[in-house]
């Protein structure tokens, strides 16, 4: 899986309230949620982000309360993946569950420049931008399968269908 797009940079400790404010947690439609994505950091961001773009964050990206709405809103906004120096544990799991790829790159905020184009090769574990390439530790096999399926629910459905087919065949 390869992702390519413009870089949008955010700093350290970007919490889930900044990504999607609590007042929007009653919204279940991803297309509506996307309009409020990152409004706590940049109220016009959702209007400017393009399909395939890449979010870059500092340390502890996605910290704060457990709200699956945060990665859902980011994915619905068209972001193809997030690169950060580190992630909040609950955000990391929620992002995987909704099929939003994450890359942990220790020097992401100093290495990658706002507005530049970046390419992320999940299969080879590389991030490239501005003529430079960095490597990252790839996700494990199960996480990779979940992401390839588009999230945890589609992955479980695939597994169930495969088991059902093997029993009936």
Image: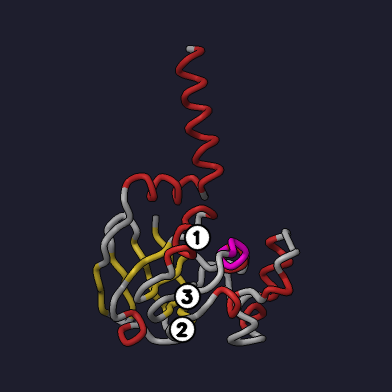
In which image quadrant can residue 130 be found?
A: bottom left
The numbered dot on residue 59 is none
Q: Nearer the viewer, residue 35 or 47?
A: 35
Asked whether, in this view, residue 146 is left or right of residue 16, the answer is left
Q: Is residue 59 above or below residue 80?
A: below
Mark 2 or mark 3, earlier in chain = 2
Residue at numbered disc 3: 55
Q: Nearer the viewer, residue 71 or 77?
A: 71
- Please name the residue shown 56% across and 43% down the image: 153
Question: Measured from the top left, where is residue 58 in percent x and y?
Answer: 39, 81
- Please name the residue shown 66% across and 85% down the image: 44
Magenta stretch secondary structure, dominant: helix
* On-image quarter of the N terminus: bottom left
Q: Per the image, is 36 magenta?
A: no
- State which region is magenta: 67-71
Mark 3 or mark 1, earlier in chain = 3
Disc 3 versus disc 1: nearer the observer? 1
Q: Is residue 102 above or below residue 154?
A: below
Residue at numbered disc 1: 95
Disc 1 element: helix
Q: CA distance from mark 2 to mark 1?
A: 18 Å
Q: Residues within 10 Å of mark 3 (few under 14, many from 20)?
A: many
């Amino acid at each position: 899986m390869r992702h390519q797009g413009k870089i949008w940079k955010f700093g350290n400790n970007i919490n889930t309230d900044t990504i999607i404010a609590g007042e929007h947690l009653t919204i279940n439609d991803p297309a509506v949620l996307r309009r409020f994505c990152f409004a706590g950091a940049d109220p016009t961001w959702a209007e400017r982000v393009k399909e395939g773009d890449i979010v870059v964050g500092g340390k502890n990206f996605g910290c704060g309360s457990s709200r699956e709405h945060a990665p859902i809103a980011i994915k619905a906004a068209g972001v193809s993946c997030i690169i950060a120096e580190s992630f909040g544990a609950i955000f990391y799991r929620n992002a995987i569950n909704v099929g939003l790829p994450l890359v942990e790159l220790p020097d992401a905020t100093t290495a990658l420049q706002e507005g530049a184009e970046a390419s992320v090769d999940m299969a080879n574990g590389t991030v490239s931008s501005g003529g430079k390439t960095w490597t990252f530790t790839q996700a494990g096999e199960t996480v990779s399968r979940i992401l390839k399926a588009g999230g945890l629910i589609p992955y479980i459905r695939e597994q169930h269908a495969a088991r059902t087919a093997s029993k009936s065949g």
